[in-house]
Amino acid sequence: MLVKDLNSIELGYDIIIVGAGAAGCVLAANLSEKFKVLLVDSKDFPRKKACSGIIVEEGKSFFEGKLDKSVLVEPNVLDIDYVDWDNNLSKKSVKGFLNSDRFALDNFLFDKVRNKHSIFFLKNTNFIEYLETLDKVHKVVMLESNGFVKPIITRYIVGCDGALSSIRRKVFSRDTPFYIGVQELIKSNINIERAIFIFDKEITDFYSWIIPKKPYIEIGALLEPKDSKGKFELLKKKIGEKYSIFGNGEYNSAIVLRPNSIKDIFLGKDSIFLCGEAAGLISPSSAEGISYALKSGKFCADALNSGKDALKIYKSNCQLLVDRLSKKFEKAKIISDSNLRKKLFE
Ligand SMILES: Cc1cc2nc3c(=O)[nH]c(=O)nc-3n(C[C@H](O)[C@H](O)[C@H](O)COP(=O)(O)OP(=O)(O)OC[C@H]3O[C@@H](n4cnc5c(N)ncnc54)[C@H](O)[C@@H]3O)c2cc1C
């Protein structure tokens, strides 16, 4: 991989990938070397994304046992206690999820593209806009870095640009609800071995959590944008009272999509593809998005590598992700309603 600055890069590429998160890195790593690929990200690298890094079964199987152990934090494997503060209910669930450090996971994924000669990478570079060319085959992508704007020509654009995807907004008009994901990593001697997922309508109609990441404990919540700061303070106060976890630590936040229905999932059109959260591939009941990002990135690479009808193949490959998500919309409604939620604890 050649890391360059926007000023010095060449004018034409086969594929431009916008976003070097989980989806963008897996896509870039799996694309055939016959393609000349430009991977851009608006952030500095290595990047830090607000994310709890819990890897569910589908994410675990994606790595086929090859996930570097150094990516995991203690306790490496997590089960979950669900607690409903509205109804005073609780339930234990054996999950066996992996407890990763998201920063280390991102570096592990980025390492897979670092040595590929067919990939050119630009950090601190924003995708702004694309325009159609007269031949209707190529597109002109406007990129910006440090106030300098440059047009680049490409055959395909893949939006792996996350919850606030500019590419999604350009090709898909539906507004998808979003939440603010807030998390704070607090140094603590309190011994917690399981993740605790909290339902409390005073705080959010989604959920909040306590996750051990030794020697830290992560407190987090998915909050409606209105008064999210006040709601997070209230959560911390309640957690202090119930679990004696106090103090302040490293605070991070990011937007999370919460798709309402299958109609919020959009995988692309013509020669524009969307992967990961940009496609709306994230669970509306748990905000689990890593496994969808990994798998859609791989499916997109497989489709583009195959040569013809790439978008059709991509959509067909993603059907199992869409089917998996379609079962979660009903659960999302149930967890949001404190009355209906009681049945999850039976
Ligand atoms: C607080 C929080 C906790 C979470 N916890 C979990 C969890 O425990 N487990 C789980 O599975 N999921 C979790 N998620 C969701 C998960 O983080 C995302 O769904 C997942 O990271 C999506 O991956 P992605 O590659 O699609 O997008 P991202 O990882 O968001 O990457 C998108 C990239 O695109 C870049 N970008 C955006 N716009 C532009 C632009 N215009 N030009 C250039 N680059 C651009 C960004 O800089 C970013 O690096 C959590 C989310 C939050 C906010």
Image (tube, rainbow, N blue to C red):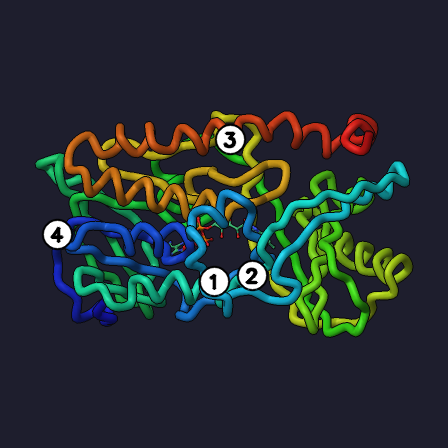
Q: CA distance from mark 4 to mark 1?
A: 27 Å
Which residue does the numbered mark 4 point to in the structure image? Answer: 34
Q: Quadrant of the C terminus?
A: top right
The amino acid sitting under disc 1 is: Leu
Q: Amino acid at mark 3?
A: Arg
Name above or below for residue 315 compared with residue 273. Answer: above
- Tag of residue 100: 2
- Residue 105 is marked as 1
User: Which sits in the foreground, 253 or 136?
Assistant: 253
Q: Give percent across and percent down for residue 277.
A: 46, 44
Disc marking residue 324: 3
Categorize mark 4 by other alpha carbons within 10 Å: few (<14), some (14-19), many (20+): few
Contact between marks 3 and 4 (CB within 8 A): the answer is no
Q: Quadrant of residue 40?
A: bottom left
Q: Residue at horizontal 40%, vertical 39%?
A: 169
Q: Earlier in the sequence, mark 2 or mark 3?
A: 2
Considering only vertical position in the picture, is 2 above or below 196?
below
Whether the residues at callouts 2 and 1 have beta carbons within 8 Å, the answer is yes
